[in-house]
């Protein structure tokens, strides 16, 4: 049996070890549990997820500490993730009622027309490492409320947080088999998604994996597939007198969570006239960011990236941008030998002949200098992705133009590209998703509508097109 080991990125300590799970056994267990769970009254399922929320609430500091240790995120940030896990339950109850309600529809006399929703069945939930609790939780809770059961495979980089969540579901009294944890890496994920007894996959992760899943399910329209993928997100800085605030918003967008957010800004597009002042201020603030272990004091702005392989890849990507014509503004460095801490890298890529349209999932900000707003919008849209985009500065008129023309699922003005609200839909276009947004709209992909025309009596007649009886 293959062993999984989770190493704390900030310290190198072993946090968790365990065995890879058996995908087929997990699916079989879920399948067995489904009919009873789906047949429970909605109120009972809601009670069950509320008990789960209460359990997490009573252990929220433990969860936050575990997130901080397993991902390297600062403890202050990990606490916000634990809080989001708890809040998700009330939000999902509301979203279920709002998005997938039971409703009477207009109908003819002597009958009624009803809209109801049914769960799909057994859903595989595949989680990423950057929000190892909040994001899988954002699929699992709505799925359970709707009457599905779940096989949850956390990222192989964050198995301990995955286990913590699954344990909280089980210990809050959910019937056996309703939430099943399956530990393992991509191979286990492949076995899970290849099992014909699942009814769908709720995925958050990279575009590469999402596209592979899309291909895998191309001939299976009967399975629900919700893909939340990455971004190559732009932030435009235009006319503003407040250069400091503009730079702060850029820094937060690019470097919170060490740049490991799907909605992180990877590309700052800046007006020619503002270039010197904005770039200087962004660099000045970036130089001041504290990059340290999650529990260190003073509190860090950001921690390490998830592991050394990822840090090596990002360092190489920064060098590749340089060797293809990028002009470094702030070099990306590895301040601690053998640990995946990275200082923010900032690079002007305006003169690069071919800019790679890839997600650099870490603290790298590319800068593009432009002369006019049309070019700024064209640059913003110059990507196959389309998750988030922001305009900093400008006017209401320019924002209207930006909003109308930008191709993204989140379009902000004078706000960061990150920090999306759980009370709103969250998803993107292009390579960022398959038009099944999550968060508030997760309810939509957790159930399908059933419309019924219903009459108490069997009464019917044909008014037109009948011959007289002999
Ligand atoms: P990843 O695609 O490598 O892995 C995600 C999950 O899929 C993991 O559990 C992994 O084991 C599993 N997996 C990998 N290959 C698989 C395969 N072929 N079949 C089945 N399962 C497979 O993503 P990651 O590196 O863990 O997470 C970071 C990525 O997630 C970034 O690209 C980020 O932008 C994205 N992300 C997207 C959102 C969003 O809501 N749009 C949110 C957070 C993160
Ligand atoms: C993410 O899910 O990776 C980021 C969410 C956000 O901060 O908007």
Image: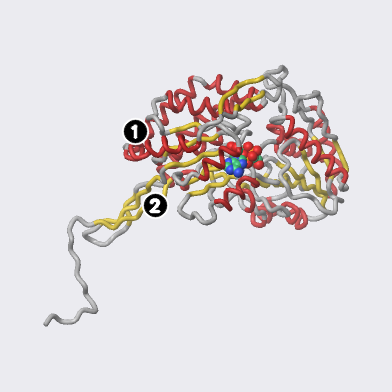
For the view shown, which residue lies furthest in the top direction? 297
Q: Which mark is residue 201?
A: none
* Residue displayed at 65% across by 50% down: 386
For the view shown, which residue lies furthest in the left direction? 470
- Residue 147 appears in which quarter of the rendering? top left
Q: Is residue 129 left or right of residue 323?
A: left
> What residue does disc 1 label?
44
* Residue displayed at 82% across by 40% down: 318
Q: Earlier in the sequence, mark 1 or mark 2?
A: 1
* Residue displayed at 56% across by 39% down: 189
Q: Quadrant of ligand 1?
A: top right
**Is 341 above or below relative to 376?**
above
Asked if residue 418 can be seen in this view, the reply is no
Q: Is residue 111 left or right of residue 424?
A: left
**Is 403 above or below relative to 121?**
below
Q: How many marks?
A: 2
Question: Between marks 1 and 2, how big is the CA–CA gap?
Answer: 21 Å
Q: Is residue 146 left or right of residue 67?
A: left
The spot of residue 210 in percent (x, y) is: 60, 47
The spot of residue 249 in percent (x, y) is: 72, 37
In the structure shown, which secondary structural element does the residue marked by tag 1 occupy?
Answer: helix
Viewer-side residue, 393 vs 297: 297
The spot of residue 165 in percent (x, y) is: 51, 28
Question: Which quarter of the rendered picture does the C terminus lie within?
Answer: bottom left
Q: Which mark is residue 449?
A: 2
In the structure shown, which secondary structural element does the residue marked by tag 2 occupy?
Answer: strand
Viewer-side residue, 399 vs 203: 203
The spot of residue 441 in percent (x, y) is: 50, 45
Viewer-side residue, 398 vs 188: 188
- Residue 131 appears in which quarter of the rendering? top right
Q: Is mark 1 within 8 Å of ligand 1?
A: no
Q: Is mark 2 within 8 Å of ligand 1?
A: no
């Amino acid at each position: 049996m293959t062993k999984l080991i989770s190493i704390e990125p900030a310290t190198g300590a072993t946090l968790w070890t365990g065995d890879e799970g058996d995908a087929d056994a997990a699916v079989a267990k879920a399948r067995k549990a489904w009919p009873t769970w789906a047949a429970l009254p909605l109120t009972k399922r809601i009670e069950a997820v509320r008990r789960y929320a209460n359990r997490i609430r009573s252990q929220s500091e433990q969860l936050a500490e575990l997130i901080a240790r397993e991902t390297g995120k600062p403890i202050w940030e990990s606490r916000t993730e634990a809080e989001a896990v708890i809040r998700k339950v009330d939000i999902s109850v509301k979203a279920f009622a709002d998005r997938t309600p039971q409703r009477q529809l207009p109908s003819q006399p002597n009958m009624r027309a009803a809209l109801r929703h049914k769960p799909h069945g057994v859903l595989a939930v595949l989680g990423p490492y950057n929000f190892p609790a909040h994001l899988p939780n954002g699929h699992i809770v709505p799925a359970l409320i709707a009457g599905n059961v779940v096989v949850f495979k956390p990222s192989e980089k964050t198995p301990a947080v995955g286990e913590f969540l699954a344990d909280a579901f089980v210990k809050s009294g959910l019937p056996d088999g309703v939430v099943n944890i399956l530990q393992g890496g991509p191979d286990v994920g492949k076995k899970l998604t290849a099992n014909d007894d699942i009814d769908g996959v709720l995925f958050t992760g990279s575009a590469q994996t999402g596209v592979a899943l899309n291909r895998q399910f191309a001939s299976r329209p009967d399975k629900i597939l919700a893909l939340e993928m990455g971004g190559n997100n732009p932030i435009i800085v235009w006319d503003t007198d407040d250069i400091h605030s503009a730079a702060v918003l850029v820094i937060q967008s690019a470097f919170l969570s060490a740049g490991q957010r799907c909605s992180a800004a990877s590309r700052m597009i800046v007006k020619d006239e503002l270039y010197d002042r904005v770039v200087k201020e962004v660099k000045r603030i970036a130089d001041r960011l504290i990059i340290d272990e999650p529990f260190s004091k003073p509190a860090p702005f950001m921690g390490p990236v998830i592991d050394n392989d990822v840090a090596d890849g990002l360092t190489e990507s920064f060098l590749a941008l340089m060797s293809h014509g990028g002009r470094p503004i702030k070099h990306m460095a590895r301040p601690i030998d053998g640990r995946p801490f990275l200082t923010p890298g900032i690079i002007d890529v305006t003169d690069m002949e071919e800019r790679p349209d890839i997600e650099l999932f870490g603290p790298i900000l590319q800068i593009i200098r432009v002369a006019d707003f049309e070019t700024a919008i064209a640059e913003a849209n110059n990507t196959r992705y389309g998750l988030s985009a922001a305009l900093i500065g400008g006017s209401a008129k320019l924002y209207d133009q930006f909003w109308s023309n930008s191709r993204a699922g989140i379009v902000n003005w004078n706000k960061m590209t990150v920090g999306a609200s759980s009370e709103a839909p969250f998803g993107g276009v292009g390579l960022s998703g398959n038009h099944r947004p999550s968060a508030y709209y997760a309810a939509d992909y957790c159930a399908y509508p059933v419309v019924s025309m219903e009459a108490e009596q069997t009464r019917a007649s044909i008014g037109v097109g009948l011959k007289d009886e002999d």
